[in-house]
Amino acid sequence: MVKKISALLLAMAAMMVHTTGWAAETVATDSGTTSWMLTSTALVLLMVPGLAMFYGGLVRTKNVLGTMMHSFASMVVIGVIWPTIGYALSFGPGILGGFVGWDPKLVLFQGIDEAIMPTHIPEYVFAMFQGKFAIITPALIAGAFAERVNFRGFLVFIALWSILVYSPICHWVWAADGFLFNLGPKGAIDFAGGTVVHISSGATALVSALFLGARRGYPRNVMHPSNLVMTLMGAGLLWVGWFGFNAGSAIASNLDTARALTVTQMAAAAGACTWMIIEFLHHGKGTSLGVASGILAGLVAITPAAGVVPPYGAFALGAIAALVCYLAILLKGKLGYDDSLDAFGVHGVGGIVGALALSFFIRPSWMAEASAKVAGGWGAWQQLGIQATAVGITVAYASAASLLLLFIVEKTIGLRIGENDEMSGLDHSMHGEQGYGLINPN
């Protein structure tokens, strides 16, 4: 009898422990949201090798590995910096008058080991999701000075840029106490990184291209892409990864997530379709590079807007961005600066178009909520003013700070490679390798 009672008590105790643990876990975390955010984190990281393929296919054969290494180096360098201090600088409480965040407990993620966010996901997941944004942003910049940059100088530049440019802008736009986050009734809208990622990298790309000067022989010599098949595959990977980029930024698994995913798909398709139509009208044929460029233009433009525009707004933003980016690339040829892979022409211009034009396509329910917080109501033109302020501040700060960093790195380590190294190609001069085996690199 005693044995039976003891066994019964043990069984009840086991059930209580199991039930208590399950209940605590259910209250603390949402497995569906957490699973989606883990998937989104992986999708965003997938974009980095996708970008490497996209850029690598656009450069000459002798620079394929060197160009792809810029993207992989960003995964490595920022992969160390972000958990060390990047997350603390970006999402810690504001210091220095709100210029940047800081919290010693966030250094090396020390204070988040058991932290569950109000969105019911472990803070580790949010931190790593945001870390992937921090990785791809400096990788985008490399498209502006492809084929002519010292690899060691590039490593130092992106490390400093991540700390001194990306982290402050990220804090202003996305941290709860960021001044752009709190500008106006509902803040400057940047759902998934139009300002933080694309405008900051695009502005830096333009400044970098101007500072370093053109590739030797540009624009006199035609510099053909080495592998447009690889570029198309890279564009496809970017498109797939962008669903995590945008839909994951809802930090949820609900209607907002579905909306963001839907408009992302629609804007990319609209951008590619519009670019093809422009090419048919302008040149009489559509090109694979045009399709890839249109996809990216649409994706970039919808990034800041994915949480606030309805489907028709996605079509409009994708089409507008494709047209404006196409014109920007034509203008580059007339002005003569060498933004090698159009990092500014697509990411900078597309991000600015999306951040500003979204003001006229905001979902009525969102605008009604904003109006309720402001005496006299709130409309598209008022929001446009907020968006323009955020864009202007981001462009000005990213450009000025990046120019200073470029000057420092160039004068200390060296950023622009010498003529002999440039003529032999990055693969050989920077890495002692060849991307295509015994193929003549020239």
Image (cartoon, rainbow, N blue to C red):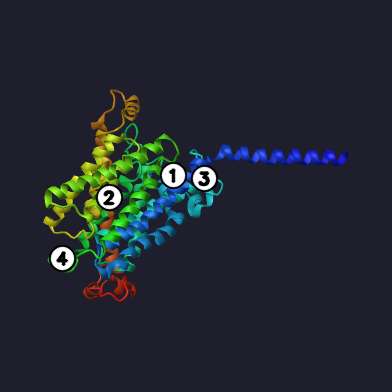
Task: Report the front residue among 214 and 11.
Answer: 11
Name the element at disc 3: loop
Task: Say the numbered circle drawn on residue 122.
Answer: 3
Is there a contact, CB below 8 Å, between mark 1 and mark 4? no
Give neighbour class at mark 2: few <14, some 14-19, many 20+ (Cα, 10 Å): many
Name the element at disc 1: loop
Task: State left or right for residue 423 relative to residue 194.
Answer: left
Instruction: For the C terminus, give its image quadrant.
Output: bottom left
**What amino acid is at disc 3?**
Pro
Q: Position of residue 40 (x, y in %)?
A: 43, 47
Task: Say the numbered circle drawn on residue 222.
Answer: 4
Name the element at disc 2: helix
Please identify, in this view, whether the residue under mark 2 or under mark 1 is nearer the observer.
2
**What amino acid is at disc 2?**
Leu
Task: Say the numbered circle drawn on residue 197.
Answer: none
Structural distance between the alpha carbons of marks 2 and 1: 34 Å
Q: How many marks?
A: 4
Name the element at disc 4: loop
For disc 1, the marked residue is 93
Is there a contact, CB below 8 Å, between mark 2 and mark 1? no
Structural distance between the alpha carbons of marks 3 and 1: 19 Å
For disc 2, the marked residue is 296
Is there a contact, CB below 8 Å, between mark 4 and mark 2? no
